[in-house]
Image: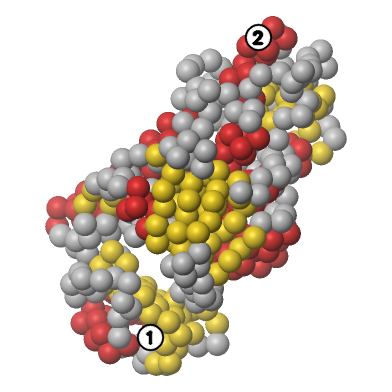
C-alpha cells in the first residue's frame, strides 16, 4: 500500500511530496497533464515562501535562477516603497517563473525518493477506516493510506468528496500571454503610463529578445476559462483598451483568468485532504496564490507524516484545517479588497487614492506588506508569549544560522540556557544549545514548519508542551 497519493503535480503537490519524503513517507504524485505546462501564471515567491525553501536548504537553487526585487507596490498595484524593518532575513520578492519553480520542486521531490507519474488522471475515489482507493482514467486502481487533492481550482478530488466550495463567481476576466511586440520601448512606456492611469489590469513586461508578458482586461467572462483566448481576441482587446495592438505577433502561449473567490467548506474528509487551489481560489492580485498553496503543503506535510508514522498526537492532523483555512479566508478578503481598488469606477478609485495616502504611514504600509508576504501570520496556539504561534525568522547563531538547522524537517529546541532536554523525543526533535544575539528569550521550541510552539526555560513546562505537537515520548 502507498502511504500518500498526491493528486496534482503543481507547486503545492510537489512541495507536499518533498515534505513527506523527509520523513520517509512513501509518496506517489499523479499529474493529469502529459507534459509540464508552458503557461506562466505565477512570477515569484514572497518572503514567507522564500523562508520555506531556505528552511529546507533549497534557497541557493532558487536564487541561482531568480531575480530579487523590492517588496513594495504589491497591494493592489499601489506604488509604494518597501517598508522598513520587516521581520525577515529575506525582505525581497524573488522573481521566478512558476514553470521554473515546478521544475526545481520536481527535481527535489525525485531526489528525495518521491515517484511522479504524468498523464495519470484521478476519476474516482472511495475510502474506509484503513485507507483510500484511487481510481484512474486508464482503469488502474491504487490503494493508499491517505489521498491529498492538490489538483487546482477545478479539483476532481474536491468534487468527488462532495465538499462545498462557496463564494463568488468571476465578475471580470483578464487575458494573459507571452508574445513578441514590435512597439519601441518609448512607445510602450508611454502607452503603459497612459492606460494604467485608469486601468491597472493592463501591462506589458519585457522578458528579453522582444518577447513580453502581456496582460489586458477581457471584454466579458468566458463560459469555460480552460479554453485559451485566440490571438485575434487578444489583439482586439489590446486595441480596445490601449488604442494599439503594440505590434503583437508570434504568441508563445495565451491564457485567461477570472476573479472567482471561493473557499472549501472543509479541508479534510476522513483520509482525504485538500490543499492549494483545490481548497481556495481567489484573484491573483498581490501574487499570493502559489505562495499560499506552498505554505499549505509546508503546514500539512509534517502532520500527515506524523499520522503515517503513528506518532501524531490527537488532533494534530485536524490542526491543518484549523490553522490554514483562516489564512486562506484572510487572503480571499484582501484580494477582494484589492480587486475593488483596481476598479475603473469613480467610487473605488476614490477609495484607492485614500488607501494610497494611508500607506504613506509606515505602520500601514508594513501591515499590508506583511499580509501579502505572510510574514505577519500568527497561528492561534492558545496564548502565551508573543512569539508563540509565529514563525521565527532566520536569526543568526554563534555557530551559523537558525534555518540551517531545519533542513531535515524535524522539530527543534533552540536552547540558550544549556539546561533543557528533549529526552524521549530525540527521534522527532533536535536539541541545539547555541546563542543568538537576535533572540531575547531563554529557549524556543519550533515545530518542523518553523512556528514557535513554546518559549521559556522551565523543563517541566517544556514537558507539558512537547506531547501536544510531537506525541508521546518514546519508550
Find residue 382 and name its label.
Answer: none
**Can residue 438 be spotted in the picture?**
no
Considering only vertical position in the picture, is 117 above or below 325? below
Residue at the extreme right of the image, as rendered: 399
Residue 150, horizontal then vertical, whole percent: 46, 54
Name the foreground residue: 29 vs 98. 29
Q: State the scheme by which the image is colored.
A: secondary structure
**Can residue 465 be spotted in the picture?**
yes
Residue 289, horizontal then vertical, whole percent: 43, 55
> How many dots with numbers?
2
Residue at figure coordinates x 72%, y 9% from the top left: 459
Q: Tell me which corner region of the image, top left, top right, bottom left or bottom right, holds residue 238.
A: bottom left
Name the foreground residue: 258 vs 14. 14
In this view, the mark in front (2 or 1): 2
Instruction: Tell me the SS state at disc 1.
Output: helix
Find residue 187 and name its label.
Answer: 1
Residue 415, horizontal then vertical, whole percent: 76, 21
Q: Tell me which corner region of the image, top left, top right, bottom left or bottom right, holds residue 112.
A: bottom right
Reading the image, the residue beneath label 2 is: 461
Question: Disc 2 or 1, which lies upstream in sequence?
Answer: 1
Residue at the extreme left of the image, as rendered: 346
Considering only vertical position in the picture, is 426 above or below 48? above
Residue at figure coordinates x 82%, y 24% from the top left: 433
Quadrant of the image for the C terminus?
top right
Name the foreground residue: 120 vs 392. 120
Instruction: Tell me the SS state at disc 2.
Output: helix
Residue 212, horizontal then vertical, whole percent: 46, 81
Residue at figure coordinates x 47%, y 18% from the top left: 382
- Report if the CB atoms under discs 2 and 1 are less than 8 Å apart: no
Report, in whole angstroms, how far the alpha carbon at label 2 lies from the one at label 1.
66 Å
Amino acid at each position: 500500500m502507498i502511504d500518500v497519493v498526491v493528486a496534482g503535480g503543481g507547486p503545492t503537490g510537489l512541495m507536499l511530496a518533498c515534505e513527506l519524503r523527509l520523513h520517509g513517507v512513501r509518496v506517489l504524485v499523479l499529474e493529469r497533464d502529459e507534459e509540464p505546462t508552458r503557461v506562466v501564471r505565477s512570477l515569484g515567491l514572497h518572503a514567507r515562501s522564500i523562508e520555506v525553501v531556505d528552511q529546507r536548504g533549497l534557497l541557493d537553487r532558487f536564487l541561482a535562477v531568480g531575480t530579487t526585487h523590492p517588496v513594495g507596490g504589491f497591494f493592489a498595484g499601489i506604488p509604494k516603497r518597501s517598508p522598513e524593518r520587516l521581520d525577515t532575513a529575506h525582505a525581497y520578492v524573488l522573481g521566478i517563473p512558476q514553470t521554473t519553480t515546478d521544475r526545481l520542486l520536481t527535481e527535489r521531490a525525485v531526489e528525495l525518493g518521491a515517484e511522479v507519474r504524468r498523464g495519470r488522471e484521478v476519476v474516482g475515489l472511495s475510502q474506509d477506516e484503513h485507507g483510500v482507493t484511487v481510481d484512474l482514467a486508464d482503469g488502474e486502481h491504487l490503494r493508499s493510506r491517505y489521498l491529498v487533492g492538490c489538483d487546482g481550482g477545478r479539483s476532481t478530488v474536491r468534487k468527488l468528496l462532495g465538499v462545498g466550495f462557496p463564494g463568488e463567481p468571476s465578475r471580470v476576466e483578464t487575458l494573459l500571454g507571452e508574445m513578441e511586440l514590435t512597439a519601441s520601448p518609448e512607445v510602450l512606456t508611454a502607452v503603459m503610463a497612459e492606460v494604467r492611469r485608469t486601468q491597472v489590469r493592463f501591462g506589458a513586461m519585457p522578458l528579453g529578445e522582444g518577447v513580453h508578458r502581456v496582460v489586458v482586461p477581457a471584454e466579458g467572462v468566458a463560459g469555460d476559462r480552460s479554453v485559451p483566448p485566440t490571438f485575434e481576441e487578444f489583439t482586439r482587446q489590446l486595441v480596445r483598451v490601449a488604442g494599439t495592438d503594440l505590434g503583437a505577433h508570434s504568441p508563445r502561449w495565451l491564457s485567461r483568468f477570472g476573479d472567482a473567490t471561493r473557499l472549501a467548506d472543509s479541508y479534510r474528509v476522513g483520509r482525504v485532504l485538500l490543499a492549494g487551489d483545490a481548497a481556495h481560489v481567489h484573484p491573483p492580485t498581490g501574487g499570493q496564490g502559489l505562495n499560499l498553496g506552498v505554505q499549505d503543503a509546508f503546514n500539512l506535510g509534517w502532520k500527515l507524516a506524523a499520522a503515517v508514522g503513528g506518532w501524531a498526537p490527537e488532533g494534530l492532523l485536524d490542526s491543518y484545517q484549523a490553522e490554514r483555512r483562516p489564512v486562506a479566508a484572510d487572503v480571499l478578503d484582501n484580494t477582494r479588497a484589492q480587486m475593488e481598488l483596481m476598479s475603473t469606477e469613480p467610487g473605488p478609485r476614490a477609495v484607492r487614492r485614500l488607501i494610497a495616502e494611508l500607506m504613506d504611514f509606515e505602520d500601514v504600509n508594513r501591515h499590508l506588506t506583511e499580509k501579502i508576504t505572510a510574514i505577519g501570520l500568527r497561528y492561534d496556539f492558545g496564548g502565551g508569549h508573543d512569539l508563540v504561534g509565529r514563525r521565527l525568522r532566520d536569526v543568526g547563531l554563534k555557530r551559523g544560522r537558525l534555518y540551517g538547522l531545519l533542513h531535515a524537517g524535524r522539530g527543534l529546541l533552540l536552547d540558550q540556557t544549556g539546561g533543557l532536554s528533549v529526552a524521549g523525543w530525540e527521534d522527532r526533535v533536535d536539541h541545539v544549545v547555541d546563542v543568538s544575539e537576535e533572540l531575547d528569550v531563554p529557549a524556543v521550541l519550533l515545530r518542523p514548519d518553523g512556528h514557535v510552539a513554546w518559549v521559556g526555560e522551565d523543563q517541566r513546562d517544556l514537558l507539558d508542551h512537547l506531547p501536544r505537537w510531537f506525541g508521546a515520548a518514546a519508550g
